[in-house]
Amino acid sequence: MNRELTTHEKNKFRQQLQALRARLLGDVKELEAEALRPTGALSGGATEDPGTSEAAEEVARTLLASEENLLNEVSAALDRLAQGTFGQCEHCSRPISRERLEAIPYARTCIRCARAGEREPV
């Protein structure tokens, strides 16, 4: 059975999440610059094929959305730490296993609820 996370464990997760947030913030800034770069512009004043440039910008926009979503999840996990609800499943209120938190420190749900959610129709 899962016991409550210790202060040491919570601090370890806080440090992991803060480091992940810092990395993601840098990634988001880079992706924003790439996605907002004018079509056809390359560094050094050269131009590239517009189709290639548009495809690269679309990839950057897709990655940006994914990174922003992950950044939001990390920030929400840090909020849960501050509120004292970190490590508690948002659906069933049971503890989230340490193994799951080690793999996904921003997890909102226990593995049982996460699997049940995968089976639910969208």
Image (spheres, rainbow, N blue to C red):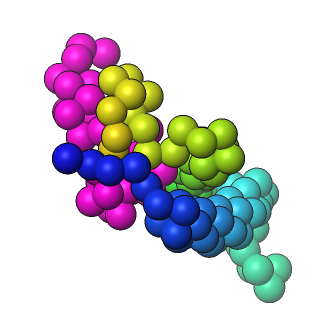
Task: Determine if the magenta segment contains residue 68.
Answer: no
Front position in the image: 52 or 98: 98
Q: Is residue 75 left or right of residue 58?
A: right
Front position in the image: 118 or 114: 114
Q: Give the range drawn in magenta.
A: 97-122
Residue occupying the point 60% across, 49% down:
81
Q: In this view, does 45 lie above or below 89?
A: below
Q: Is residue 23 above or below residue 6?
A: below
Q: Is residue 32 left or right of residue 53?
A: right
Q: Is residue 98 above or below residue 118?
A: below
Residue occupying the point 33% across, 24% down:
92
Residue occupying the point 58% across, 66% down:
11
Residue 105 lies, in percent from the top left, at 44, 57
The quadrant of the rendering that contains the C terminus is: top left
Q: Is residue 66 something one can see in this rendering?
A: no
Q: Residue furthest right?
A: 45
Residue occupying the point 33% across, 33% down:
94
Quadrant of the rendered structure where residue 69 is? top right
Residue 74 lies, in percent from the top left, at 58, 51
Q: Is residue 79 something one can see in this rendering?
A: yes
Count how many numbered circles sit on residues in the image: 0
Quadrant of the rendered structure where residue 34 is? bottom right
Residue 50 lies, in percent from the top left, at 62, 58
Task: Determine if the magenta segment contains residue 98.
Answer: yes
